[in-house]
Image: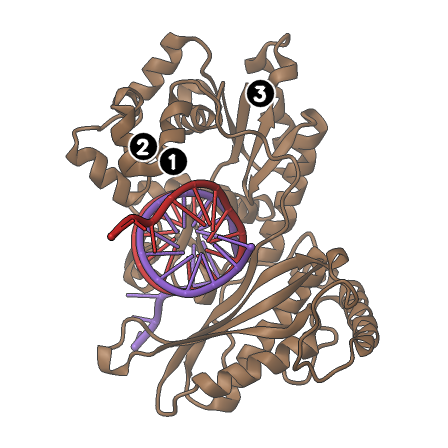
Chain colours: A brown, B purple, C red
Amino acid sequence: MFALVDCNNFYASCERVFNPALRLRPVVVLSNNDGCIIARSEEAKALGIQMGMPEFKCRPLLKKHEVAVFSTNFALYGDMSTRVMMTLADLVPEIEVYSIDEAFLDMTSFARFDLTEYARLIRRRVRQHTGIPVCVGMAPTKTLAKVANRLAKKNPHYQGVCLLRSNAEIQAALERTRVEDIWGIGRQWSKLLQAKRIESAADLAVAPAAWVRKHLHIVGARIQAELNGKSCLPMELVRPAKQSICTSRSFGRSVTLQEELQEAVATFAGKCAVKLRKENSLASLMTVFIATSPFNDSSERYWGTRTASLPCPTNDSLAMLKAAQTMLDALFRAGMSYKKAGVIVSGIVPKGAYSPYSTTLSLFAEEDPASNEQESKIMQVMDAINQRYGSGAVRLAAENSESWKPHQERLSARYTTRWNDIIEVN
DNA sequence: TCTGGGGTCCTAGGACCC
DNA sequence: TCTGGGGTCCTAGGACCC
């Protein structure tokens, strides 16, 4: 038996926890650069504000209804997420943190309890410890637990907890779920299914298995099996190491100068290096991309990307920055108005697995592997200082965000991670 | 004028190995 | 005249997730 705990309107709820006056107002949270709506309170949804809508397009509506609008405050949401997950882990030891606002719990060993009662306790406890409202869906497979959670969210009479156990309960739930609302069925597959008159989850459950396997591949076949109560997706208690790490941003204004782009790309490479070190991993490949606005006329559009292998697997900021600069030089085209850039690292190996003596060395690497030792110590010191005094306390000189800094005009305080932010509020 | 960021998995085809 | 079987790795493209 799986439970899926999902926070309600997570980002909007985080803003409300520290600003109780917002409980009476619709709340929305914007994407980076204050671009699109990415979270809405129930009241905001009721006003017809769509997910992913550009903010400038619904500005009149936001104003008319005095909607509270926030820039994305990832420091706050990330920390609140950790608190929610810690509370859950105290109540159910087998937990898979699935996303920033969701976790699967293995309820198998709770079979002798009243599951619905226990789920209510989970809700109360999370609310009490963090202020975040959650819903709980429970069923014999992860996909069905997702279905159950959705029902708990949509129908107030469940009071936030929906358990699907008997065949009759499961069948009724499947009939009330459209294919596009099933976990793993996106836009394209919905279209395909609807063309085949497969409209509800109940329809998909009984669709010809060979057809599903052929058109929706192994992924779709698993979804179908899960809808039929056959569990194919086990709990993943340990998060696997990341296979790729990406840092990218849209710019607050158009950037035309190569030097400004260099500062942006250096900053992203530096951030990728920090993320790699946090994972205790090394990257062997790096991709750099720069892009104009996709909304430009095609004559003014450019999407440049380049991938190169690093001289040897590394998480050293200096080495990564150097590689990124070289790639940017090859990509840069003068006369374009750039709106976005990013750095992606891949070919990731755990740090312990790599040693210059056990791995093939680059024929062309300029440095002797022994010199990496010292650089690695510099990075350790940098990370320690930034940990203690806040990220950005020390950085490489090439990292600079003055020219391209994204808009963040409605940022709330980092209530749970920065003393200074709280002092300013009071 | 203004339009997000960060991931995963699967498939198919080509190049290569013994 | 007859010309196999079993693999891996890489890439691009397409789908999906939050």
Q: Is the Cβ of the residue at disc 2 closer than 8 Å to that at disc 1?
A: yes
Residue drawn at the location 52% of the way across and 76% of the way down? A405
Identified by mark 3, the residue type is Ala
Q: Position of residue A278 (x, y in %)?
A: 71, 58
Q: Is residue A164 above or below residue A319?
A: above
- Horizontally, residue A241 falls left or right of residue A262, namely right
Residue drawn at the location 62% of the way across and 25% of the way down? A122
Q: Which residue is mark 3?
A: A119
Q: Say which label, 3 or 1, has the lower sequence index.
A: 3
Residue drawn at the location 45% of the way across and 19% of the way down? A230
Give the number of the mark in front: 3 or 2.
Answer: 2
Q: Is residue A400 visible?
A: no
Q: Say which label, 3 or 2, has the lower sequence index.
A: 3
Identified by mark 2, the residue type is Arg
Q: Position of residue A152 (x, y in %)?
A: 43, 24
Q: Is residue A104 above or below residue A41?
A: above
Chain ID for label 3? A
- Horizontally, residue A47 falls left or right of residue A80, namely left
Q: Say which label, 2 or 1, has the lower sequence index.
A: 2
- Horizontally, residue A221 falls left or right of residue A408, namely left
Element type where label 1 sits in the image: helix
Q: Is the Cβ of the residue at disc 3 closer than 8 Å to that at disc 2?
A: no
Same subunit, tags 2 and 1: yes
Identified by mark 1, the residue type is Ile
* Distance in Å between CA atoms under marks 3 and 1: 32 Å
Element type where label 2 sits in the image: helix
Instruction: Report the disc number at residue A218.
Output: 1
Instruction: Report the disc number at residue A213.
Output: 2
